[in-house]
Image: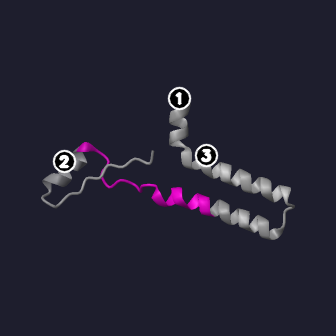
Amino acid sequence: MNIAAFVNHNSYAIAAAIALAVAGFEIVRRRPTWRRIALFAGLAALLTLPPLYVRSGTGVVRSADAVDRAIAAGKPTLLEVYSDF
């Protein structure tokens, strides 16, 4: 994998890590207080939630044969193809 593909694949994690590094540096530079540490923890939690929310769930159909059977069953079938990457 080349560096451009790596950055493209992990761009959110890289941006979140940079944001947390800058926030952490500012906390250390300005003297840590409980409030600043709590805000940092909140920022970390806030940056962790979006990837967990948009991640796809488990597939209902796992093989081409299962897709064929679902279509042949006579019920309306929605085929959605999605990748987390």
Q: Position of residue 35 (x, y in %)?
A: 79, 70
Marks 3 and 2: in contact by CB < 8 Å? no
Amino acid type indicated by mark 2: Asp
Q: What's the distance in space between the residues labelled 1 and 3, CA to CA?
A: 16 Å
Residue drawn at x 69%, y 54% as measured from the top left: 20
Label 2, label 3: how far apart the Cα atoms are? 40 Å
Q: Is residue 42 left or right of residue 5?
A: right
User: Which mark is in front, 2 or 1?
Assistant: 1
What is the span of residues highlighted in magenta in the rendered image?
46-64
Q: Which residue is mark 3?
A: 14
At label 1, counting other C-alpha atoms closer than 10 Å, the crowd grade (few under 14, some 14-19, many 20 or more) is few
The residue type indicated by label 1 comes to Asn
Element at badge 2?
helix
Q: Which mark is residue 2?
A: 1
The C terminus appears in which quarter of the rendering?
A: top left
Left or right side of 9 for 56:
left
- Secondary structure beneath dot 3 equals helix
65 vs 24: above or below: above
Q: What residue sits right under mark 2 in the picture? A: 68
Residue at 78% in and 53% down: 25
Farthest residue, direction bottom = 35
Q: Secondary structure beneath disc 1?
A: loop
- Mark 2 or 3, nearer chain start: 3
- Distance Cα–Cα, label 2 vs label 1: 37 Å
